Image (cartoon, grey):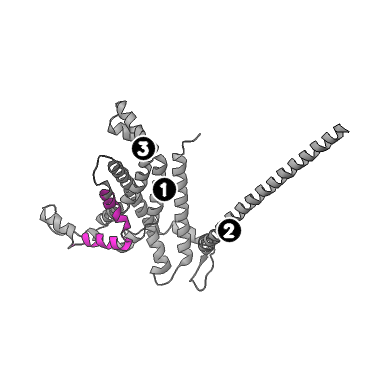
Amino acid sequence: MGSKTLSASYTGTKNMKNSKNHIKMRKKRTVTSKQHTAGWAFLTPATLFITIMSFYPMFQALITSFKTGSSADMVWSKPLFRNYTRMFSDDLFLRSVGNTFLYLIIEVPIMLIFAILLAQILNNRDIKFRGIFRTCVFLPCATSLVSYALIFKSLFATQGLINSILVKIGILHSNYNFLGTPSSAKVVIILALIWRWTGYNMVFYLAGLQNIEYSVYEAAKIDGANGWKTFWHITVPLLKPTIIMTFIMSINGTLQLFDESVNLTKGGPANTTITMSHYIYNNSFGQGVANFGYASAMSFFVFVLVAVLAAINLKVGDTRD
């Protein structure tokens, strides 16, 4: 009789434990489901908005790139890839590609080198008024794109400040038409890009440098490493993810370069400084008849270029096994 009572008691205790565990599991599932529901509630509006405002227009642009004709009466191209094959026989488009890559090859490395050097200098604890200097370097990128382009246009005008200074100090005998000569107009665009975007990239490098423990530099100094060795063997490797990110962002921005070409030189003289985005704009809105099919095809060409170059940068910069 006693053994039966003990058995029944043990069974009852076990059932109570199972019931408590079941309740806990139900509560856990309820909390998890609530978290999932809340997550989807926050994600769904943003996802729908991005889909409607970005992915759907991209899909429509892809379809449009296979069509031809005016915007009111577009028909499928014959052959279907006509707009894409036309690009490679369009001398002006090929020139715009060449100009864009020229700006990219010269401007991006110079700008990023200046940015990382300025970040290294302004991260030094011994420099007084670091905040003021950082603000001064960053201010250009807070300037409106149109405003700063017009400032450079007035500076390098035939009767502008740069000409006046160069003539007074004897470098030039007479005023030079910087924006009317193809080579010098490209140099002005590159200078404008470097001036505006160096401070922007410097902020990323400053953030990266401030995440590096100062004790690492102190240890390197104790080991006898000089400034260059410390920079090359400690700073650069630790900033590698930031360098890759800024490199991809700079490539992306330069391949879509528009404002400087439009506002500084209007693509001139004789379309020698025109960029891909400027040429796409001209085919879409800047000429008499809008050629949206051809402009969409060129836009997807730029999209593929950006994607390929970004993938190459990520692959080269990925040191994981």
Left or right: 294, with 121 as reference point:
right
Mark found first going from the N terminus, 1 or 2: 2
Disc ID at residue 236: 3
Residue at the spot x=33%, y=61% of the render?
A: 145
Q: Which residues are magenta?
A: 132-158
Question: Which residue in the rendered view is the most extreme toward the bottom?
Answer: 72
From the image, give the main secondary structure of the stretch colored magenta: helix
Q: Are marks 1 and 2 in contact (CB under 8 Å)?
A: no
* 179 relative to 14, above or below: below
Question: For numbered disc 1, what is the local secondary structure?
Answer: helix
The answer to which quarter of the image holds residue 210 is: top left
Was residue 259 drawn as part of the magenta stretch in this picture?
no
User: What type is the residue that disc 1 sits on?
Assistant: Ile
Residue at the spot x=28%, y=60% of the render?
A: 148
Q: 214 or 144: which is nearer to us? A: 214
Which residue is identified by label 2?
41
